[in-house]
Image: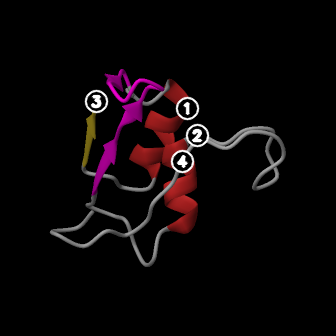
Amino acid sequence: MQGSRVLGVGWNRQKETLGQWSTHAEISALANAQGSVRGATVYVARVKRDGSLGDATPCGHCSRVLKDFGIKRVVSS
């Protein structure tokens, strides 16, 4: 997000999507983003089957990619 504007939305995908075997939500959101994400804030949430929130801290690879794209802040559940 930049201000109140949502730039992209993503979710975890299995199998061959975007040329990979699986895609994490953070990467999916970047791929779907409209315009530049530099300076944006990324919100990541994991919702369990029972509706409660789980730990959604980005993995090391996703953290590096977010940094490379210039993401300013990551907020996770």
Percent of width and height locating residue 41 = 25, 53
Left or right, 12 with respect to 74, comes to right
Q: Which residue is mark 2?
A: 24
| Disc 4 residue type (three-letter) | Trp
Q: Earlier in the sequence, mark 4 or mark 1?
A: 4
Looking at the picture, how far across and down is residue 25, in whole percent?
Answer: 52, 44
Residue 50 drawn above or below residue 39 = above
Neighbour class for label 3 at 10 Å: few (<14), some, many (≥20)? Answer: few
Q: Nearer the viewer, residue 28 or 63?
A: 28
- Asked whether the residues under the numbered discs 1 and 3 touch, taking CB atoms below 8 Å apart as contact, a structural biologist would say no
Residue visible at 15% across and 68% down in the picture: 3
Comparing marks 4 and 1, which lies closer to the viewer? 4
Q: Is-magenta flag for residue 21?
A: no
Q: Quadrant of the C terminus?
A: top left
Indicate the secondary structure of the residue bearing disc 1: helix
CA–CA distance between discs 2 and 1? 10 Å
Q: Position of residue 40 (x, y in %)?
A: 27, 60
Q: State yes or no: discs 4 and 1 in contact (Cβ < 8 Å).
A: no
For numbered disc 4, what is the local secondary structure? Answer: loop
> Which numbered disc, 3 or 4, marks the residue that appears first in the sequence?
4
**Mark nearer the N terminus (2 vs 1):** 2
Q: Determine contact: label 2, label 1, CB under 8 Å.
A: yes
Instruction: Name the residue tied to disc 3.
Output: 77
Q: Which residue matches tag 4? A: 11
Distance from Cα at disc 2 to Cα at disc 4: 7 Å
For label 1, the residue is 61
